[in-house]
Image (tube, grey):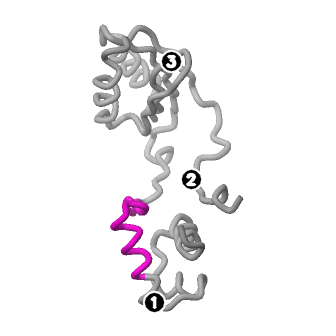
Amino acid sequence: MKKTHLKILSILQTDGKASYAEIGKKVGLSISSVQKAIKEMERENVIKGYKADINLEKLGFDLIALFLIKANGPHIRRIVKSLKEDRSLEFVYEITGEYDIATMGKFRNRETMNNKIKELLNDKNIESTNTSIVLSIEKEERNLDFLKE
């Protein structure tokens, strides 16, 4: 990937509303070149979309739980598919190691979190779960700095 594309991506990550002109000034490209680069990255699905960075704590979702799930092998894909559709979960990963799936959800209170745990354990193909509650958020962002190495 071109260095200018990486610079554009970095700018968009910190300011998704940056204009083509603003981006062009920062990376030394014309407005049309920036527009072309962004359209190309959208077409290639490098840029998957544009979203508002919402502070869920301000909306009352201040309980974060991490769930590690051990599933019955042949049913892992079905469970992952079901978890992906669950709007209370922010990410779902299929992982290696003692557990098969890692997921994280944000909840309004302990009761809604407990309901999620019970829902998971009611699936006969989920053998066990391990739940951890997040005490503090030290970093919660995705950036491209690692690409500079």
* Residue for point 36% across, 17% down: 120
Residue position marked by numbered label 3 in the rendering: 99
Tag 3: amino acid: Tyr
Crowd rating for badge 3 (residues with CA inside 10 Å; few <14, some 14–19, many 20+): some
Q: How many marks can you see?
A: 3
Labelled pair 3, 2 in contact (Cβ < 8 Å): no
> Above or below — where is 110 with respect to 47?
above
Tag 1: amino acid: Ile
Please indicate whether residue 133 sits to the left or right of residue 123 in the image. right
Residue 44 in magenta? yes
Residue 32 image point, x, y percent = 42, 89
Residues rendered magenta in the picture: 35-51
* Residue for point 42% across, 74% down: 38
Tag 2: amino acid: Arg
Question: Which label's residue is closer to the chain start, 3 or 2?
Answer: 3
Q: Identify which residue, 114 or 30, lies in the foreground.
A: 30
Q: Secondary structure at mark 3?
A: loop
